[in-house]
């Protein structure tokens, strides 16, 4: 499982020119799922993401978590995080989770994030052609990969 976490001032996702999810200050997270992923892996990844201290405190040090700053989440599925570009110029996506399983895991991640009290959780639309807009704050981008945790 891979999460690409971008600290944002704001972010939104559109499908067919209609906003389906939007947040203010927080994390816009691209989520990639592989067939070997489990709910236990997702739980660890979510816990790590929620507790990341990458917002600045009063002294300008990255010492505050999403919860500390009243941050919000925008979760967007993205199978292309599992692109394999080793051979040729056309990426292979065979390492990405099969659509039904990946969607199930994506929905699980969304539901699990919603259990965190006071956390606004917005989402994209699985499998749709999405247009994501964001203002990356920093820029500050973190990649969490379950194979490296």
Image (cartoon, rainbow, N blue to C red):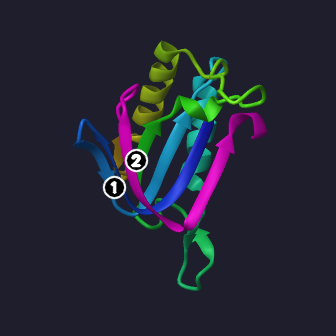
- In the image, the segment drawn in magenta is 124-149
Q: Is residue 110 visible from the viewing direction of this image? A: yes
Examine the rendering and report whether any part of residue 116 can be seen: no
Question: Is residue 107 shown above or below 14?
Answer: above
Neighbourhood count class around disc 2 (C-alpha, 10 Å): few under 14, some 14–19, many 20 upward: many
Q: Is residue 18 magenta?
A: no
What residue is shown at x 62% (from left), y 22% (from top)?
A: 93
* Residue 135 shown in magenta: yes
Examine the rendered structure and indicate whether residue 22 appears above or below residue 102: below
Give the distance between the C-alpha atoms of the residues marked 2 and 1, in whole angstroms. Answer: 6 Å
Rendering coords of residue 19 (x, y %) = 24, 45
- The residue lying at 57 percent from left, 25 percent from top is 39
Task: Say left or right for 10 vs 52.
Answer: left
Question: Residue tagged by mark 1?
Answer: 23
**On screen, 9 above or below 141?**
below
Observer-nearest of 75 and 58: 75
Note whether 49 is above or below 64 in the view shown.
above
Discs 2, 1 touching: Cβ within 8 Å: yes
Find the residue positioned furthest to the bottom. 59
Q: Secondary structure at mark 1?
A: strand
Prevailing secondary structure class for the magenta stretch in the rendered image: strand
Quarter of image, res 79: top right
Residue 74 image label: 2
Identify the mark nearer the N-term, 2 or 1. 1
- Give coordinates of residue 103: x percent, y percent: 45, 22
Query: Quarter holding the N terminus?
Result: top right
Residue drawn at point x = 43 percent, y = 42 percent: 75
């Amino acid at each position: 499982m891979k999460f690409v976490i971008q600290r944002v001032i704001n972010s939104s996702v559109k499908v067919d020119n209609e906003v389906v999810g939007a947040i203010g200050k927080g994390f816009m997270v691209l989520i990639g799922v592989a067939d070997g992923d489990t709910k236990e892996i997702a739980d660890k990844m979510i816990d790590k993401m929620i507790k990341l201290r990458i917002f600045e405190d009063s002294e300008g040090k990255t010492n505050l978590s999403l919860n500390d700053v009243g941050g919000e989440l925008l979760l967007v599925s993205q199978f292309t995080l599992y692109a394999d570009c080793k051979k040729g110029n056309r990426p292979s996506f065979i390492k990405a989770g099969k659509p039904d399983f990946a969607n199930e895991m994506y929905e699980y991640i969304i539901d699990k994030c919603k259990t965190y009290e006071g956390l606004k959780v917005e989402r994209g639309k699985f499998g749709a052609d999405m247009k994501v807009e964001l203002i990356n704050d920093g820029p500050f981008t973190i990649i969490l990969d379950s194979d490296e945790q």
